């Protein structure tokens, strides 16, 4: 008689047609500056990875310090430094051949710039596109440019929709109380899914000896464990809004996820996939595979056979 | 502890007061600071007891900028950085007087390896080019029998001549020591079979030549690399080189690791992340450098 081996829970997910071996996605802004780093993140076990946001022209970003860690998370004001869409198109020219789906990230001041970047980037072979309308610390972009209203969200999404047939995810801010309305506006504009959420705030950390804020831009987005309960609530709010409107669209839950338990929490709030960023600092670049393994083991312990079984488990 | 419950380590600056400014030469100064209280420093993530030569610190001038520097000295009372005037930030550091306040975060990255194994050996060389010599100084403090080989453009750019007696000096113009480059000494030693290990830091064209000579001679080799850094803690990707994060996986790399890093000696990134070829202007420590490469 053969012994029956315990069945390993299925943690693969289908995200808008992208087959992910696990739901752990490298969030935008972390590491995604080169093809080689994307390969490494794939080797480290991520289910998918998002590149650092690309603008029409090269940007130097804010002066240092741009990223600092404190006891509950991280504060950053990188300021969208990137090499610009021309160089990004060369850097990522063959991302379609990498072992995991790679998600592009396009930014602009106005809708036409978002669309311009999308049109130039997507032929590289990106599996999907994320448009962050929610950066809290870069003048001319995101929250500071008024991109976080339902009208702007719908307008920008619609312009980008005309530029690519690939799935579009709109990344929302946790600082907007009516996040559910924003999600519906994004879907109305033609988005396929929602990324919730960007970093929070902005926040400020002051050095009392220097009598100055530590970040050169003075304020920056809060991420990491400090953001997690807010991010979970935002995912819950978005999922609830979609359900009420009788709309089906996947959510990438992002904010402070550090281990498998955090990832499962996001999924129970309604997320299909889970973004990881700040945990790269606390646990190293190997964090993606570690979280995926922990998630699978935890599902095994809790008797969860597949993630679909518990997705949105806490929704009414 | 639950899996994945690692605590976040702070990486906040601790503000130190410049205790003394020592002029090293026409281009370089050493800033000395008192060692901070370990408890207070530890709360901000600054653990000097864990410092390994080759690691770096982010040096902060409030309302100006923050850049990576290696410690050039550390003992129980005092730590130091040695700064070469290259761009606006280093120029401002060079103008600081005793009493000035400077923020420090770190130590970050992976320092030089195998220090204990080779610590008492005479068959070790520390090969520095320009201000790269400063990065090797804490190593020289721990490896008293090693030979420090210092190369500079001319006599007025040399440092630490009185600090380390076991030293060979090269200048490009022959104004002090031997005329030529430290790599010539390395070739002689390699041919004579006098070395087991080489640690190096300096212009990448020199470091690349050192790696190549060591590889051919079967000598162990480690290089402290420099790239434009932002976060310093392995998350932003700014310092990426062939899939490696110089701030986290480096800045010290072995010859074997560098053998599979084609950008070493070839390609850097500017502040925006654009790639550019390393030119002779950047390779030469006191020649004019492109604006983006200035520190």
Image: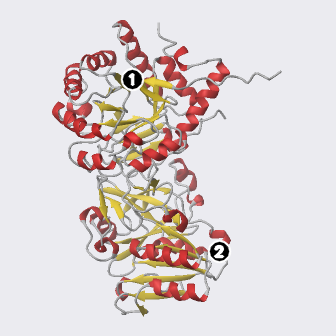
Residue A80's spot in the image, x, y percent?
A: 29, 43
- Above or below, A247 against B191 in this view is above
Chain designation of label 1:
A
Residue at x 31% of width, y 28% of height? A166
| Residue placed under numbered mark 2 in the picture | B119
Q: Nearer the viewer, residue B20 or A134?
A: A134
Residue at x 54% of width, y 59% of height? B110
Q: Is residue A289 visible?
A: yes
Chain designation of label 2:
B
* Image quarter in which the C terminus of chain B is found: bottom left
**Residue A236 falls in which quadrant of the image?**
top left
Q: Is residue A207 visible?
A: no
Q: Nearer the viewer, residue B142 or A5?
A: A5
- Above or below, B262 against B138 in this view is above
| Residue placed under numbered mark 1 in the picture | A16
Residue A22's spot in the image, x, y percent?
A: 52, 30
Residue A209's spot in the image, x, y percent?
A: 40, 51
């Amino acid at each position: 008689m053969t012994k029956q081996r315990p069945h390993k829970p299925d943690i693969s997910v289908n995200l808008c047609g992208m087959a992910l071996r696990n739901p752990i996605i490298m969030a935008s802004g972390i590491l995604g500056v080169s093809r080689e780093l994307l390969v490494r993140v794939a080797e480290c076990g991520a289910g998918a990875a998002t590149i650092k946001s690309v603008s029409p022209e090269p940007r130097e970003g804010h002066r240092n310090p741009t990223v600092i860690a404190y006891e509950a998370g991280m504060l950053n004001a990188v300021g969208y430094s990137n090499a610009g869409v021309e160089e990004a198109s060369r850097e990522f020219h063959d991302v379609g051949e990498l072992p995991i789906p790679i998600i592009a990230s396009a930014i602009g001041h106005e809708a036409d710039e978002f669309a311009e970047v999308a049109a130039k980037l997507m032929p590289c072979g990106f599996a999907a596109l994320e448009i962050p309308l929610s950066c809290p610390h870069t003048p001319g972009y995101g929250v500071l440019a008024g991109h976080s209203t339902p009208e702007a969200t719908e307008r920008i999404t619609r312009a980008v929709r005309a530029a690519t047939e690939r799935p579009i995810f709109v990344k929302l801010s946790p600082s907007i109380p009516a996040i559910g309305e924003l999600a519906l506006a994004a879907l109305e504009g033609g988005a396929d899914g929602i990324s919730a959420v960007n970093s929070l705030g902005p926040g400020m950390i002051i050095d009392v000896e220097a009598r100055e804020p530590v970040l050169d831009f003075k304020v920056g987005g809060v991420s990491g464990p400090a953001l997690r309960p807010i991010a979970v609530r935002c995912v819950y709010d978005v999922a609830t809004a979609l359900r009420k409107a009788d709309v089906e669209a996947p959510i990438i839950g992002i904010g402070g996820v550090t281990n498998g338990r955090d990832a499962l929490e996001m999924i129970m709030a309604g997320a299909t996939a889970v973004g990881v960023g700040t945990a790269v600092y606390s646990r190293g670049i190997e964090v993606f595979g570690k979280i995926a393994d922990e998630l699978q083991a935890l599902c095994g312990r809790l008797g969860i056979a597949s993630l679909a079984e518990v997705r949105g488990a806490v929704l009414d | 502890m639950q899996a994945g419950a690692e605590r976040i380590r702070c990486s906040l600056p601790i503000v130190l007061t410049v205790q003394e400014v020592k002029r090293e030469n026409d281009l370089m100064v050493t800033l000395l600071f008192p060692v901070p209280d370990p408890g207070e420093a530890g709360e901000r993530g600054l653990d000097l007891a864990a410092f390994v030569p080759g690691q770096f610190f982010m040096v902060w001038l409030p309302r100006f900028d923050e850049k990576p520097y290696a410690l050039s000295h550390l003992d129980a009372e005092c730590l130091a950085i040695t700064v070469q005037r290259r761009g606006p930030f280093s120029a401002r550091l060079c103008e600081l007087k005793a009493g000035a306040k400077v923020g420090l975060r770190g130590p970050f990255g992976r320092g030089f390896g195998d220090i204990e194994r080779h610590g008492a050996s005479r068959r070790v060389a520390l090969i520095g080019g320009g201000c790269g010599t400063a990065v090797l100084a804490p190593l020289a403090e721990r490896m008293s029998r090693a030979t420090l080989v210092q190369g500079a453009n001319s006599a007025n750019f040399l440092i630490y001549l009185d600090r380390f007696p076991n030293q060979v000096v090269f200048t490009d113009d022959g104004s002090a020591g031997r005329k030529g480059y430290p790599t010539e000494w390395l070739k002689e030693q390699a041919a004579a079979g006098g070395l087991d290990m080489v640690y190096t830091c300096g212009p990448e064209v020199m470091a690349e030549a050192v790696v190549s000579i060591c590889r051919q001679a079967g000598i162990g080799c480690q290089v402290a690399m420099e790239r434009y850094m932002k976060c310093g803690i392995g998350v932003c990707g700014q310092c990426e080189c062939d899939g490696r994060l110089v701030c986290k996986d480096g800045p010290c790399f072995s010859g074997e690791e560098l053998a599979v890093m084609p950008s070493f000696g070839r390609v850097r990134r500017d502040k925006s992340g654009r790639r550019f070829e390393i030119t002779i202007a950047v390779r030469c420590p006191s020649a004019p450098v492109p604006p983006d490469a200035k520190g």
